[in-house]
Amino acid sequence: MFLHPNEKTLYVANVEDNFISIINTESEEVTGKIEGIKYPWGFTRLGNSNFVAVSGYDKQLAIIDYSKNTIVKEKNFTSNLGGITSTKDGKFIFVIETNKNSALKLDASTLEIIDSYQTGNAPDGIGISKDDKKIYTTNTKDGTISVINTLNKKSKLLEVGGKPELIHSNKDNSVLFISNFKLNKIHIVDTETDKIIHKITELDSPEEAVLSKSGKILYVVNFASKKVYAYDSSNFKRLKNEYSVGNKPIGIVSALNDTKLFVSNYGDNSVTIINLTN
């Protein structure tokens, strides 16, 4: 999911279809859709622009102008695409090639391939460091996280075991939150030292771990139990707040000054809306 900077519009990727749903977060209604995305997978905003890059699993990358809700540029690739991220200035995009065990670096203005980087087996999620010099990929079949220097292509592995999957970050990308579906953990990685500085455990097939807009709360989606847990981001201690959602939840977004949570439910083709002011 991608939340418009004004927090009033939410874009939801329909990963087994060819469109993105548009939800008004105030009225809680589907107000439209953007068609022409082949199995939309991930989003990354390009700097402070009105453009968001979307990876389509069926070998496509598209740029959407979210001020107009239209595709302004697209390109087809030779590999299925997965996780996506970009540099702070929005000039470069990094995207996973899921069946080539690699990540691509693209010029965001032309979508031309600038470079590629070898990952582990079956890469899924991707993140970027605070200084934009390193990318991180989750290698689902190896139980590892690749740390790749994009300047010299040197890489190292964080051996975590299990099935690391999705990557989210805090506001400045100094910390990454990486879910491990099989080990029921969230690995928290410092992008300066590349060390795991904390682990959240006792989860139930975690998917996205995403901070609230204030940065004070970390929400973790539990795929198997249909629950969302909340953690104090200052110490990662679990809070009493716990929310029931739909079947096989994956994504989560906090919107409207942290007054609502939107959770995408893969198993129901639905979005659960949680009003935090009640």
Image: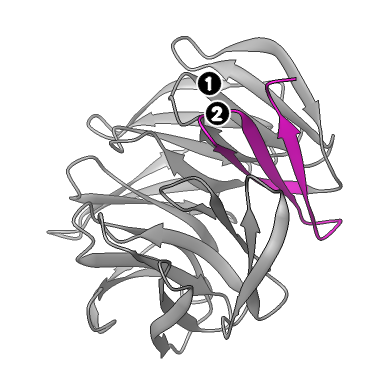
* In this rendering, position of residue 236 left or right of residue 175: right
Q: Are marks 1 and 2 in contact (CB under 8 Å)?
A: yes
* In this rendering, position of residue 258 left or right of residue 243: left
Q: Does residue 214 sit above or below 24 in this rendering?
A: above
Mark in the foreground, 1 or 2: 2
Residue 133 rendering spot, x and y as whole percentages: 18, 50
* Crowdedness near tag 2: few (<14), some (14–19) or many (≥20) residues, C-alpha within 10 Å: some
N-terminal label among 1 and 2: 1
Q: Is residue 252 magenta?
A: yes
Q: How far apart are marks 1 and 2 (CA)?
A: 10 Å
Q: How many marks?
A: 2
Judging depth in this view, the residue of 65 and 83 nearest the camera is 65
Q: Which mark is residue 258?
A: 2
* In this rendering, position of residue 1 left or right of residue 105: right
What's the magenta bit mostly, secondary-structure-wise? strand
Give residue 74's quadrant in the image: bottom left
Q: Residue at x 23, y 40 (%)?
A: 130
Residue 263 rendering spot, x and y as whole percentages: 70, 44
Q: Does the magenta stretch include residue 153?
A: no
Give residue 21's quadrant in the image: bottom right
Q: Which residue is drawn at 85% across and 44% down?
A: 246
Residue annotated with mark 1: 217
Judging depth in this view, the residue of 99 and 17 nearest the camera is 17
Residue segment shown in magenta: 249-278
Q: What residue type is labelled 2?
A: Asp
SS of the residue under disc 1: strand
SS of the residue under disc 2: loop
Residue 171 rendering spot, x and y as whole percentages: 34, 35
Q: Does residue 5 sit above or below 161 in this rendering?
A: below
Residue 12 rendering spot, x and y as whole percentages: 62, 60
Q: Residue at x 38, y 33 (%)?
A: 170
Q: In which quarter of the image is the N terminus?
A: bottom right
